[in-house]
Image: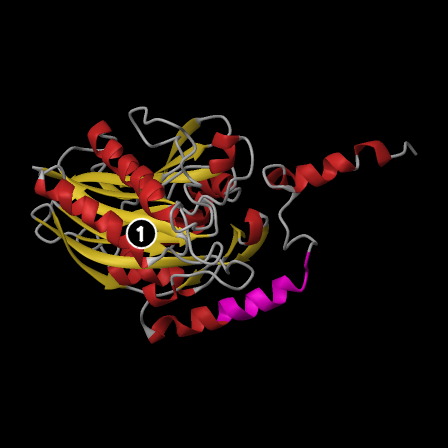
Amino acid sequence: MKTTVSVIKADIGSVAGHVVVPKELIEFASNKLEEYKNTELIKSYYVTNAGDDLQLIFTHDKGVDNPEIHEMAWNIFKEATEKVSKPMKLYAAGQDLLKEAFSGNVRGMGPGVAEMEFEERKSDPIAVFMADKTEPGAWNIYLFKIFSDPFNTAGLVIDPRLHDGFKFTVLDVIEGKEVDFMLPEDMYDLLAVIGTPSRYIIKEVRRKSDNEIAAVASTTRLSLIAGRYVGKDDPVMIVRAQSGFPAMGEILEAFAYPYLVAGWMRGSHVGPFMPVPLKYSKVTRFDGPPRVIGLGFNVTDGKLIGPVDLFDDPAFDYARQLAGQIAYYIRMHGPFMPHRLGPEEMEYTTLPQVLKKLEGRWRTT
């Protein structure tokens, strides 16, 4: 029997601005998932936060994009907004719930979703990554390093089960099209595309030899749904580890350097992607910097064992220190590029409202 792992997140309210999800929301969502577990709709769950985003992590046997599962998550977010966020006057209560009524799938309705279905191996470790204050394309460079870069993942060279490479499916979020790249042979073509992470997003990775799912990432772009800036997308991702996939240590190695990603304050700035433990799962400086939380689980008989707080380790102290140094440096640019995003991305922020005031003041030269 196959097991489905689902991660569905939404920003439905936070304390002290866009800082952190309060314990009351986490407790409410946990209690609701316990009710659904008792009805046997789901098998296990874990609720946490990445900054101001409420994260629902759970397992079931309904498959990917199941309407009953998605409606469950939607109802939890809606009810938590009405019964917790609004009475507490949390900031941005219900922000990611862009539609009024559920329409069969939360994709395209605001919440971010990453799901994968697979037959369990003898042991099936997974890593769940949750980001705050950035866009889904932020995963591009990390997925590339995990599944394509032999300087990061030694198994690509020395493990016969990885040596054949992986298939990357990339989504064009502007045109709504996708394309597959076979690596290593299509490596340069892939890099030519995913180097523009605001448009081209790695949707999933599969083992090339047997098409087995290896990683999935959320692809929701809130601004493209709403037609305006309503907060950053804050993506999630699931990656399988060990026994035919990169080792957990190889997966985490990709996060040892805080690469620059788009988002941060008002979704309008570039900043370092800082790997942090759950105790630092809040955003403060300039509403950031952008950060990533990693939790490790074993999937056993359809249930989650764990989690392990993967970045709660001094081995990542230097990455955090370096991210802090990069943050200080790039913040000195203030409103200037490359700290502020380029004009194409700024079209989906609040800047157009400012530019509209200047329309009658431009003179022809």
The reply, left or right, for residue 199 in relation to residue 360 is: left
The residue under label 1 is: 25
Q: Position of residue 245 (x, y in %)?
A: 23, 51
Answer whether residue 153 is visible to the viewer in this image.
Answer: no
Check if residue 118 falls in the magenta segment: no
Answer whether residue 97 is visible to the viewer in this image.
Answer: yes
Q: Position of residue 344 (x, y in %)?
A: 63, 38
Q: Quadrant of the C terminus?
A: top right
Q: Position of residue 50 (x, y in %)?
A: 37, 55
Foreground residue among 53 and 92: 92
Amino acid found under the numbered disc labelled 1:
Leu
The reply, left or right, for residue 112 in relation to residue 38 is: right
Q: Position of residue 100 (x, y in %)?
A: 39, 28
Density class for disc 1 (Cα within 10 Å; few <14, some 14-19, many ≥20) is: many
> In the image, what residue occupies the spot 38% across and 47% down?
87
Foreground residue among 62 and 260: 62
Magenta stretch in the rendered image? 322-334
The reply, left or right, for residue 172 in relation to residue 294 is: right
